[in-house]
Image (spheres, grey):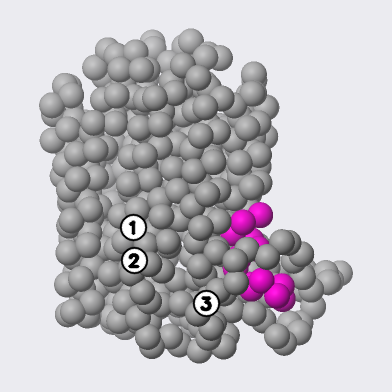
Amino acid sequence: MSFPNHKTLMPRIGASRIAPLPIGTKPTDEKSFWFVAALAFAQFALFVALLGPVMVSMAIKVGTLEDDPVAQTSMIGFILGTGAIAAVIGNVFFGRLSDRTRSRFGRRRPWMVLGSLVMLLGLWVISIGTNTPALMLGWLITQLGSNAALSAFMATLADQLPEKQYARTSAVVGIMQQVGILGSIWFATLFTANLGALFMVPGLVGVVGIIIYAAVLPDQVLDTEPPKLDIKEILRSFWVSPVQHPYYALVWWQRFLMMLATFLFTTFRLPFVAGRMDMDDATGAETIFTGVLIYTILLVPIGYLVGWLSDKTGHRKLPVALSATLFAIGTYLLFHVDSPGEFYAVEALLGAANGIYMGVDMALVLTVLPDRNNPAKDLGVFNIANAGPQSLAPYLGGFLLAAGASAGSPNFGLLLVVASAAALLSALLILPIKKVK
């Protein structure tokens, strides 16, 4: 069975003033401040829309449908975990289609814009949903749309950036991801009582950010006819040989474990804070916002400074290993948190750790990509290491929280110990990589 080559049809979105490089050509000229600013805002906007439900909004929505705390965490885990499976499949599949797209508007632009609109549709379905199947359907649509946009968006980093700009720009992208998390939680504090605005306002921010970036992107046009896309080729899209590309495999696994550590906690952060400190959802959301604000204040300058130093020195491995170790320590310390002040102190440590990580990690990924001609495919496979933990963490987290749980009190201690161990193992996996300093 084979599929025809995809040729996307859509209205033109602002002709680029910068001539695109031929496909496969390694960029040498640094991108302008305005290009990086548009890229950064798109990352921020997309994560405001996408991570709001993961961090806070879905927990608030579920809280309107279910009163029991243990049942709430199970319901959140089931919905987010099922949707993240769609993220794993969608990111790789749409990334492969993006590499092959022959639209006159470029390979990336059509998927970015259309994907963001589908994401907005999914968020609307969640906002009006009244039961678990409706919320799960909305989250599936949201994940498919957002990952169509995200796979094309991330491929533009490999398409457009020279290697000497990798760490600084990846630091900006990583920082904007974290600022996007802060923005999503801020919106949640504004719209806790308005479920429509809680999901739709961040969704609209995401669409606007992607459209602005699409308008300035000097997107590459594929002139040659790619081979037919058959089932075998589709399945191959989900695989990069760890034997032929061992450093790529090690970087993949360190990211997987780091993201698993992150999402084991953040998926259940609202019920953790609210339950541990005896708060309602609104007060818990405000406490989380303050914590993430402190986290972000530390992350932003540290991330950019580490990215700048990494580009100057060429060192990538040590900062990643150090950051994962600090993150493991911080995650373990959450087990001993009993007050907002203690929570804020640990968030500061986690922010510093993640700032180091975000400043260097994406530069490390871009350095070990196997194929410059088809970066969206390889980045799509790599993004399984991002999306896979989003799928696994809710299920694994739900199991860990239920193990040994007392009446109405999930086992957060076990959850945090497992998250800490995953981050520590992530730090160890980076050490054998010899391709980078």
Callout 1: SS? helix
When the figure is inspected, residue 119 is found, relative to residue 431, above or below; the finding is above
The residue that label 1 is drawn on is 174
Disc 3 marks a residue whose amino acid type is Arg
Nearer to me, 54 or 205: 205
* Alpha carbons under labels 2 and 1: distance apart: 6 Å
- Give coordinates of residue 29: x percent, y percent: 37, 85
| Camera sees residue 243 | no
Q: Residue at x 67, y 27 (%)?
A: 134
Mark 3 vs mark 1: give the one in front: 3
Q: Quadrant of residue 182?
A: top left
Residue 59 — which label?
none
Q: Vertically, is 245 above or below 259?
A: below
Q: Is residue 105 left or right of residue 74?
A: right
Could you say where residue 91 lies in the image, as x and y percent from the top left? 58, 58
Instruction: Kindly indicate whether the residue at mark 1 contacts the one at mark 2 (C-beta within 8 angstroms).
Output: yes
Please, what is the three-letter code of the amino acid marked with disc 1?
A: Gly
